[in-house]
Image (spheres, rainbow, N blue to C red):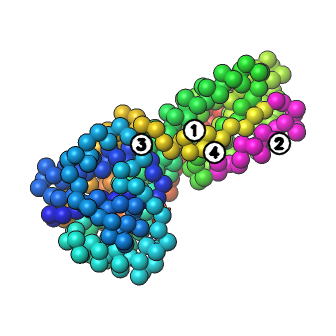
Amino acid sequence: MKRIGILTSGGDTPGMNAAIRATFKACDAMGMETFGIYHGYVGLIAGRIEKLNHAQVENIMHKGGTILRTSRSEEFKTEDGRKKAYRMLCAYDIEGVVVIGGDGSFKGAELLNDMGVAIIGIPGTIDNDMGYTDFTIGFDTAVNTITNEIYNIRDTMRAHDRVGVVEVMGRNCGDIALWAGIAGAADLILTSECCMEWDEAAAKLMDFKLRGKLTSIVVIAEGAGRAADFAEFVHNKTGIDIKAIVPGYVQRGGNPTASDRVLASRFGMRAAELLKNDIGGRAVGIKDNKIIDVSFAEAIATLDCFDKKLYDFSNDVLARF
Ligand code: ADP
């Protein structure tokens, strides 16, 4: 393979730039040209494609977002749209593409791969909701960002003897809530996988208060409900002074952690190696600290597995008072 493309798709995550840089550098070292495809599948269909050079990937390792920009494309979900994308790749003689994104992007990648162009997926989503890989790019950074937020919030909650409930991203996957909750020493974590009844949660907070713990921090994954609704529920039930905090998009931004930068670089290395060997249709990942690659079908079908034991340990043991 001589010419490959690279694009970022779906939600952006810190560490995408590190993956772009590593893929470009690895391809360059192996004698392949790399073309940047801007704005994900939208730009692929529209031909927003240019050859990358070293200057373009210089000084991007530490930056959040993606220099290639990203998007969601309805057109790419149609066969006509994908045919246009395929023809565009043929026009540029691009034989392989690295797609950095989440499971939606991988579904599209698999279909494009089946049309005859080698596609490799790199998992980029802060939610860590892809079961075939232990970690996705951006998760560690998001966890660190929220952990810091929790500590800031705790300072002000403590000053007023209040309870704070922090709503974090994760519609179907509670990993961010679990990890940031543990790192932020949360007193209660609620996720979609193991959401306790709000009655029980309110009773627990009341029990903390009666035994002299005046400030508690609750972390709620968005899949388990809205922080504002939970705060209202608890207040109505117990009279506890409780504030809802929704950090929102700050969870997506910021400089990637060293761990995310290294993970992204390792993913980029494997993606380039696969394409060099004319292998497509694979999603790279990490299992037990080893870089792996699996078929898109397996990557998409493998359900995320939530660490229930760790969740119970956090709520039942670490949060004891
Ligand atoms: P993520 O990759 O972060 O999960 P999305 O689910 O929004 O983000 O998917 C990103 C893009 O991938 C979509 O806008 C669409 O162009 C493409 N895509 C998603 N699902 C499919 C699908 N089933 N078939 C074809 N393309 C898809």
Main secondary structure of the magenta stretch: helix
Name the residue that disc number 2 marks: 233
In the image, what residue occupies the spot 88% across and 39% down?
236
Q: Which of 112 and 89 is in front in this view?
A: 89
In magenta segment, residue 77: no
Q: Where is residue 64 in the image (x, y as percent from the top left)?
A: 42, 42
Q: Nearer the viewer, residue 48 or 264?
A: 48
The range drawn in magenta is 221-241
Mark 3 or mark 4: name the one nearer the start of the chain. Answer: 3
In the image, what residue occupies the spot 71% across and 49% down?
225
Q: In which quarter of the image is residue 47?
A: bottom left
Q: Where is residue 35 in the image (x, y as percent from the top left)?
A: 24, 60
| 282 w.r.t. 82: above or below | above
> Mark 1 CB in 8 Å range of ligand 1?
no
Name the residue that disc number 4 marks: 221
Looking at the picture, which amino acid does disc 3 mark?
A: Gly
